[in-house]
Amino acid sequence: MGHDLPSIVSRVRSMLDPRSPDPSQPLLTEMEHTLTDGYARALQLEGERLRLERQIGELARRIEGPDEAGELRMLTQRLRNADEDLAGLRDLLSELQRRVEAERAAA
């Protein structure tokens, strides 16, 4: 499966939805695969954050005019977005991890 963030978030949320009837409850294996995909995407986001932080630091050292200032604002916004995406994904993955552990204990 791909590591598209909206797709992963949607899959996790559907697995955590308490309104789902029992016959359509996800299998433990499916939840584990989703966790793996989610953790892989979280690692990608962390790598993106590091690259953005590096770019921001480099640009801040050589900033001279409005063009660089605009680029710095854009990079800073991208970093904020990555932080928000990562925090939200981690929260969902933690919740799904607890669900997986409960399913394992019940089995």
Image (cartoon, rainbow, N blue to C red):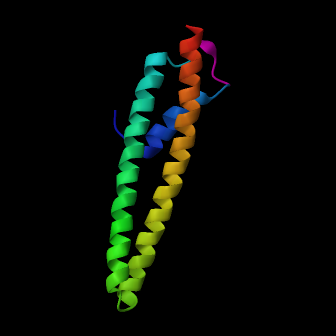
Quarter of the image for residue 58 reads bottom left
Residue plotted at (42% across, 44% down)? 42
Viewer-closest of 50 and 5: 50
| Magenta stretch secondary structure, dominant | loop
Query: Measured from the top left, where is residue 96 in percent x and y?
Result: 55, 30
State whether residue 103 is above or below residue 51: above
State whether residue 93 is above or below residue 42: above
Residue plotted at (35% across, 53% down)? 47
In the image, taking residue 5 as reference, residue 24 lies left or right, namely right
Specify the farthest residue to the bottom: 65
Residue plotted at (55% across, 47% down)? 88
In the image, taking residue 23 as reference, residue 33 lies left or right, namely left
73 in magenta = no
The part of the chain drawn in magenta is 19-23
Specify the farthest residue to the right: 19
Residue 13 seen in this snapshot:
no
Query: Measured from the top left, where is residue 89 in percent x and y?
Result: 51, 44
Q: How many marks?
A: 0
Residue plotted at (38% across, 78% down)? 71
Quarter of the image for residue 36 reads top left
